[in-house]
Image (spheres, rainbow, N blue to C red):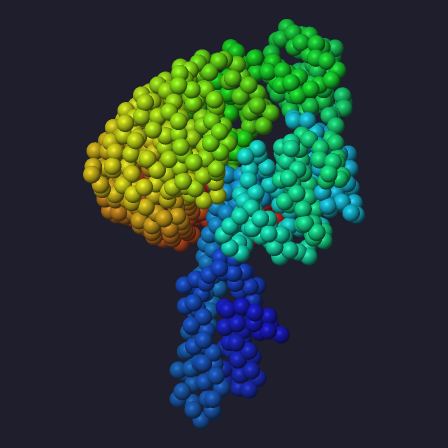
Amino acid sequence: MAADMLGGNAIGAVFGELLRVVLKVTKKTIMYKTKLKQIQEILESNIPILEEIEQLNKKLDRGNEETEKIMEVIRNGKTLVLECSKIRWYDYWRRPRFTDKLTELEGSINYFFQTVMPAITARDTKILRLEIRDLMGSGSNGTIHGRNVSCAIPESLVMPVGLQVELAELKMELFKDGVSIAVLSAPPGCGKTTLAGLLCHDEEVQEKFKDNIFYVIVSKNTNMEGIVRALFSHKRQQYLSDFRSDEDVVYQLEQFLNSIGPSPILLVLDDVWPESESFLEKFVFRIKDYKILVTSRSVFPRFGSTYKLKPLNYEDSLTLFRSSAFLPNQSQDIADETVVSKIVKGCKGFPLALKVVGRSLCGEPEEVWKTRAMESSKVGSIFEHTDLLNSLQKSLDTLDSKVILKECFIDLCTFPEDQRIPVNALVDMWMELYNLDEEAYAVAKLQELCNRNLADLVVTRNVVSGFYNQQFAMQHDLLRELAIRQSDLEPIEGRKRLILEISANNVPAWWMEQNQPSISCRLMSISTDEKFSSSWFFIQAPEVEVLVLNFRSKNHTLPEFIKKMEKLKVLIVQNYGFFPTELNNFLLLGSVTSLKRIRLEHVSIPPSAFTSVKLEILQKITLYMCNISQVFSASTILVSESLPNIMEINIEYSNDLTEFPVEICLLTKLKKLSIINCHNLISLPNEIGKLVNLEVLRLVSCIELLELPNTIGGLCNLSILDISECLEIERLPEEIGELQNLRQLIMMGCSINCVLPSSIMNLEQLKEVVCDEETAILWKPIMLVCKNLKLKVQKEDINLNWLYNHRS
């Protein structure tokens, strides 16, 4: 029975009750049969829609105001229908009144399904997508906001050259009865990670393990607790309690795995370092259909089955090399087959070497090919790890004529292994280190490195050109090793960059010596783990222009030696731990007189941090996943005095930002302001109209932001306005027509009910509106009048099917 189909959820139950009453009364009365039949047909035809919205409410773990209102109407409707059943033929004077009420009920239900429901479904689907994107990073590589702390499998790849047989063999090995752990072993650059990713996307593997496939990148400094927290987060489960000890971490992992059984489980531990047997033991449990796949440079005989991935054969090597060395439709006659054969054989079947070497020769004259062939023939028959690095080094040497590009490649090693590198962080570094005038020049350098297969660019979401907050760089661990080796060629005193990786409190011996070497590097990177106590030894490094601090501890203190870095222009502070880190000693930044750019990630910043020190030449602040409550509030110094030359502020993923800091509105030199994925931001102050020099305002995915203030018309220099996915904005203010310099308006994923004021036609400089297909409907009437306006429509899929198939 149709009414019974609606009994399992809140809104469905209410509609189901009305439908049952309608069916019952229709059988007993003839006076309102036609009207009741019409209501019955409406309810029955919309059962699938009711089920869809209830699924959305469950996934969002909430109801919504619109459905509460219609549920009250339906409850009253049920009472009305029951009263109709009591009307007798002699109550003719009451019939018209009840007919009118039934007509009103029918109209309300029709309006709900035809107008309100589509809006709710579209909006809630977008909210759900935003929440899942934020949980999973919306990326393609299993991260949370760019961090490799999730357990989602890498994006699906087209079958790479030469791995079809290996995929079948590895799958067979993993599926064997009695095999609980399979080790995929090969030298670096051989394709272990690629093959493991392909296995996870294989149809048979997907069918067997379904949603219980977990992919964890185990870098050198990954700890057990971080992995277990990521597993719980991936399945959106709560820990039994906070982790009290290493034993408790293992115990809760076992409980977690048992809780998702008896369904089969596949755990992939990618890039496990040698001598990690004790680490692997912690993941082994006697659980039925629980399989572990380990990828490593080493074999682990104690854990049984090992599949050794062999290098590519010559035919596959040649195919892969040609795909990198020659552009599509490009002639391949530049070198004879003998030369090509020597180069290919010199790479010994290693995919990474074939791609990097091939791309380094792309477009080069014949003489360069012949020289490379002669060098390749000198490599011995046993291709050791050092040989591979030497082969890659020769490709890096081709950049000698492009000094800045080579330096940019080496700079990538300043960030931790296996972590995404925010493109905006690289932009900050490179613009200051290499005196680049435009951000696009820095991004072009990264793109060229990607074109040469020396880095990878991960775009987690297609965004409008010129904005890079959804773009990240990745570097293969072997290429990172090459970059570090290149950086360390010079003695400490002569290095351009100093890369320090500290385990616990074990600093290099030279750092504790009374007569330290004279440090002259321009870039310094210090990475510490969760055991580091923030007890810094002094270091004299007066030439440092960029300082990168990577850490995992719950509390982190900025080192006092920053005060002596007189040339420091860029400070990047990144916490790779699971929870925000308390950042201490912030006030010392007031002693750094050259600081232009600050980027803080995943930290809790002290209240009034930016109003307690004078940062007189600071131009850009980026706060990413930070707790920033009251950081701009007035203290001993007015914000306009502490940040007199600030030109750009970026705030992303700040959960405690509910009201926009009105103090920012006093920064009249501000040109760019971005508030992105701050889901609790409700309002903007009227004072925002005082930012008369603002050129770019981005309010992206602020899903609770209710409106733009009327004072926005005061932004007389605004040229770009982005309100994408601000779902609650139902009307643009009339004063938007006063933005006479507005050239681009971006409205991706906005409410389909958003009202555009007539003043929008006054925007004579508006050249482009970027929106999705739904929002484009709002602009079509305006396009008839504004002939020079370009409407750029980007498709946006709001189908829920991807929720069950997509893994970031």
Q: Residue at x 79, y 47 (%)?
A: 177
478 relative to 429 in the view: left or right:
right
Q: Is residue 23 above or below residue 499?
A: below
Q: Is residue 134 above or below residue 790?
A: below
x then y, percent, for residue 78: 47, 78
Q: Is residue 237 above or below residue 367?
A: below
Q: Residue at x 64, y 45 (%)?
A: 283
Q: Residue at x 45, y 54 (%)?
A: 123
Which quadrant holds residue 227?
A: top right
Q: Is residue 757 visible?
A: no
x then y, percent, for residue 258: 64, 55
Q: Is residue 171 above or below residue 341?
A: below
42 relative to 436 in the view: left or right:
right
Residue at the far bottom in the pictured view: 90
805 relative to 106 in the view: left or right:
right
Q: Is residue 142 visible?
A: yes
In front: 287, or 502? 502
x then y, percent, for residue 553: 45, 39
Q: Residue at x 44, y 14 (%)?
A: 493
In front: 348, or 28? 348
